[in-house]
Structures are given as structure tokens and as C-alpha cells.
Image (cartoon, grey):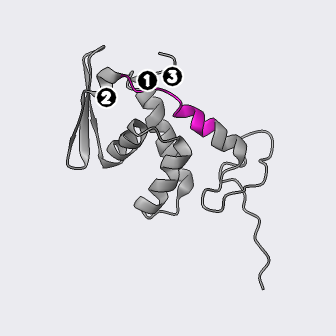
Amino acid sequence: MEKDKKITCILEGKQSEGCLPVQDKFLPLCDKHKTELNQLTAGRIADSIRNNFIQKGDEALIFNQKNGGLYSLNPTGTFIFKELLAGRTFCEILLVSIAAFNTDDIIKLAEDYKSFIEDLYKFGLLGKAHE
């Protein structure tokens, strides 16, 4: 019988302190990193943005009435945005994506998603929860 392997956080080494042991074999992130990543998706999509989200096939357009910006989303961006509209956390989106896109490169997926969500804030498509 093989002894259970210790699962390490995929983001270990990206901070000065070591990560705590990982509890979830399906999402190899320590609790600290889960919390940090989930805080990214704690924002709110304004009703004006929700009402101006138009999906065509697996791509979408978003019109921001506040700044007049028109943004196009590729299939992955559309997938993430729809998950955000449904109120999912970063880690929930990541878990669903691993299965949906049949990928093992969770680090790249997490980095790409983090960058995309930061862009949503930058372009005013996602705001702080109290706005």
C-alpha cells in the first residue's frame, strides 16, 4: 500500500514564508492562497455592466456606460465572466475550469485568471463590493 503523498501548494515559493499543508487534493492551494485569490472575486459587477453583457456563441461583448468602453471577451474570458456573474469565487471558478478545459497546468490557469480579473477591475467592469 502506497503512503499518502504530501500535497504542496502550487504557489509555494511565491512568498517569503512557506505554505501550510494543502487540504484539498483537487485544488492544490494552501488556505492562505485560497483566501488571497478569493478576495479578488469579492468585487461586484454593477447592474449597468450586467445589463450590457452580450454573449454570442462562446464569445461576448461588454459595454461600460460609465466610460464608453466596449470590451470583447474570448471564450475563456466569457466563461470566467459568466462564473463571476453567478457569484462564484476564484477557487470555485478554478475548480470548474480544471474539469471543463481538461488541463493539468493549474499554475498557468490561476495566473491567467488572476491577470484577467485584475484587468476587469482596471477597466471598471468589476468594482469593490461596497460600490
Q: Quadrant of the N terminus?
A: bottom right
Q: Residues within 10 Å of mark 1 (few under 14, many from 20)?
A: few
Residue wearing tag 3: 129
State left or right for residue 99 relative to residue 21.
left
State left or right for residue 82 relative to residue 8.
left
Real-space CA distance between mark 1 and mark 2, rounded to the nearest whole angstrom: 17 Å
- The image quadrant of residue 26 is bottom right
Q: Which residues are magenta?
A: 36-46
Mark 1 and mark 3 in contact (Cβ < 8 Å)? no
**Residue type at the position of mark 3:** Ala
Residue wearing tag 2: 50
Real-space CA distance between mark 3 and mark 2, rounded to the nearest whole angstrom: 15 Å
* Residue visible at 25% across and 49% down in the picture: 58
Q: Which mark is residue 122?
A: 1
Which numbered mark, 3 or 1, is in the foreground of this view? Answer: 3
State left or right for residue 72 relative to residue 45.
left
Q: Position of residue 42 (x, y in %)?
A: 53, 30
Q: Position of residue 40 (x, y in %)?
A: 54, 33
Q: Position of residue 126 (x, y in %)?
A: 42, 26
Q: Dot 2 lies on which element? A: helix
Residue extending farthest left: 56
Is residue 37 magenta-colored?
yes
Q: Residues within 10 Å of mark 2 (few under 14, many from 20)?
A: some
Mark with earlier residue (3, 2): 2
* Residue visible at 30% across and 21% down in the picture: 48
Q: Dot 3 lies on which element? A: loop
